[in-house]
Image: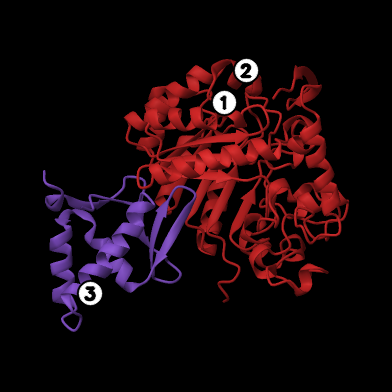
Chain colours: A red, B purple
Amino acid sequence: MTEEYRPYTLIAELTYRCPLRCPYCSNPLDHARHGEEIDCATWLRVFQEAEALGVVQVNLTGGEPLLRDDLEWLIQKAGKLDLYTNLITSGIPLTFERLARLQAAGLNSVQVSIQSSRQNESDRIAGTVSFHRKVEVMRWVTSLDLPLTMNVVLHRDNIGSVAELIDLAETLSVARLELANAQYLGWAFKNRAALLPTREQIERARTIAAEAKVRLMGKMDLLFITPDYYSSYPKSCMDGWGRRFIVVNPEGLALPCHLAHTLPGLHFDNVRQRHLRDIWHHSSGFNQFRGVEWLSDPCRTCDRRTRDFGGCRCQAFHVTGNIGATDPACALSVDHGLIESARDQASQSVGIPILLEYRSGRERPVERRSHE
Amino acid sequence: MPPDRAKIRLSPKVRLRADRRTGRCLLLYPETGLELNETGAEIVRLCDGTWTFGEMAQCLAQAHADVSPIVIERDLRAFLKALTDRGLVQGLP
């Protein structure tokens, strides 16, 4: 069997529920309307089937995975299968005792997100009072000698505080710091005009991050992830469609990326009805954009096609309306002008009040002022 | 402790295990992992907190008598430095 399409990581989205309401949330826009979550017995079967397919890591994520009270049990079962377990969490709601229980169950690492290095800004973006608790949770994580990743989604309002974020990460003995610019899909796409930084902001932040990366080498693994909107070439989405990752969403849909089921015209299968191996190898959704055969111009003959596989399908669809198009983030795309005009808009909308739509079951636009 | 007496160990975030499909050695850490070749695996297995750099070099030199100890020490240092830079190994002098 070819190892060209072997999943190494299972992204287990245990729930779409979350106490936070970040406006760049990566959950689907209609997450509140989704059906029943799959139960722990089904998740265990998913872990077993994933492990048999070659998966060695499982990211337990959401929504907020802490809202599942069977999380301890799931971690224990994943550990028994020799899977490396990452808990990807907002840190809310958690107690020290529960964290210790998760560790005892075999948890290998914890990623906590914060929304900003400043309490009021972080709480405003999260839509709930949470900053101090998150910092406390991060202290608990390191006090238990669990490896800690701090994740910050960067956008126009917080990208100016990258230096402070790095300071905070150092203070908290973070092992890995992810400064990840929002990817403009889902909620972030809806709020793009309010979130997309200017080129100057990106460059300044990138320079600070690059200096810190060198200074902290060996001590802290620092990642700065540029938004596609300011790259000349697209990223290889998920390392290639259906190549290294499987996402299983809260309802049991197996997906090549967490938003693939929001693309029109594709069919994806549910782990309740079909074995994961069968889905991975034979489902039409997983095979739709595998490899490079399906690519059209200019990707078809491009040297980069085996590196970026035509980029992100969701971005192609969101921006151009065509799921098979070259990712418009690519400077070679005929649709790249759409990305350029979004950048122009970002650089012009300085100081204009913008409506930011918060992710929540009920939609609640909140006015705030963009700045700088 | 003088740095050359420091014992070399894997960082707490790292787990070492065999890949059930290929038999190869995997170093797993948050969000990603490394697949090691045989030499890499041989070195990483020694990073268990009981050996200093010098002891590791000696041990490998005995196992590979056909390779110059100078070359072994140089390659070992380069390999451990690469892992140290990724935050995967601690104690390299």
Q: Measuring from the top left, give residue B46's x and y in whole percent.
A: 22, 61
Q: Is residue A274 above or below residue A58?
A: below
Residue at horizontal 87 percent and vertical 55 percent from the top: A322
Give the Cα separation between the discs numbered 2 and 1.
13 Å
Q: Is residue B4 above or below residue A202?
A: below
Q: Measuring from the top left, give residue A75's x and y in whole percent.
A: 45, 42
Residue A281 is tagged as none
Q: Measuring from the top left, give residue A80's x and y in whole percent.
A: 40, 50
Residue tagged by mark 1?
A116
Kindly identify the amino acid type of the residue bearing the numbered disc 1. Ser
Q: Residues within 10 Å of mark 2 (few under 14, many from 20)?
A: some
Kindly identify the amino acid type of the residue bearing the numbered disc 2. Thr
Chain letter for mark 2, please.
Answer: A
Foreground mark, 2 or 1, reads: 1
Question: What secondary structure is found at the residue carrying circle 2?
Answer: loop
Depth check, front residue: A203 or A56: A203
Find residue A215 and report its image quarter. top left
Residue at horizontal 32 percent and vertical 45 percent from the top: B12
Q: Measuring from the top left, give residue A278's x and y in whole percent.
A: 66, 64
Foreground mark, 3 or 1, reads: 3
Residue B71 is tagged as 3
Q: Are marks 2 and 1 in contact (CB under 8 Å)?
A: no
Residue tagged by mark 2?
A128
Kindly identify the amino acid type of the residue bearing the numbered disc 3. Val
Question: What secondary structure is found at the residue carrying circle 1?
Answer: loop
Residue most toward the right? A321
Q: Is residue A42 visible?
A: no
Q: Is residue A309 above or below residue A232?
A: below
Of callouts 2 and 1, the N-terminal one: 1
Q: Is residue A36 above or below residue A290?
A: above
Residue most toward the bottom? B66
Chain letter for mark 1, please.
Answer: A
